[in-house]
Image: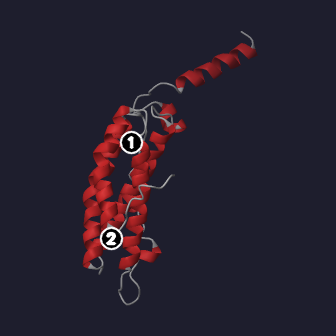
Amino acid sequence: MNIRNSFLVAASLLVFGSCTTHPGEPVRRGTLYNNESHVDSEGYTFFKQVHEKALFETQLAKHVRTTAASAEAQDLAGKVVEIYEPMAAELADFAAGFSVLLVDHGDQGFAVPHHFEADTLGAFDNAGYIAHVQHEQGAILEQFKRLSRNTVEDLQHYAEEKMPAVKELFAAAGGHEDHGAHH
């Protein structure tokens, strides 16, 4: 066997070796290293963005509940935790079925944005938090609307099931849907 054939055999083993599941690894290496999945780009974007936002918003809402925020902000934070804490875990399990890996860094991956920290007098920006929740709910709601038009029926059903709670939270934060707008 000459050097060229040896190189082709080594390259083939490398390529085919990356396509299998190795002992101790939960998924194929292509999924781990190349972001291969069994969902289209819109579904992938939905999983990544909504999961990340759900984790962040849950952690921020838990922080808000420990501050001197107004009753309105505390109530809104409670609703955020109630909706998104179980949804984040649910999304991770659901995405795994499509070979989309979602990572939860827990508390160590969360840092309170400086504009939500209490000032030197201990005051909290209630209006700023409520506006933030409204903005983020609008972005999450848009992802759910896109998912409801996806070609994968399981994703459509998931969007239809969860969208009413997201709409309710969006409305509680003062948002209203513009039914006549074209995006």
Left or right relative to 93: residue 139: right
**Residue in view at x 48 percent, y 41 percent:** 42
SS under mark 2: helix
Q: How is the protein colored in the picture?
A: secondary structure
Q: Amino acid at mark 2?
A: His
Of tags 2 and 1, the one toward the viewer is 1
Front residue of 34 and 79? 79
Question: Could you tell me if residue 52 is visible in this image?
Answer: no
107 shown above or below 152: below
Q: Which residue is mark 2?
A: 63
Residue extending furthest toward the bottom: 121
Q: Which residue is mark 1?
A: 148
Front residue of 82 and 164? 164
Residue 85 in which image quadrant: bottom left
Residue 69 in which image quadrant: bottom left
- The quarter of the rendered structure image containing the N terminus is top right
Q: Amino acid at mark 1?
A: Ser
* Percent x, y of residue 108: 39, 61
Q: Which comes before the other along the chain, label 2 or label 1?
A: 2
SS under mark 1: helix
**Residue in view at x 32 percent, y 63 percent:** 171
Left or right relative to 36: residue 70: left
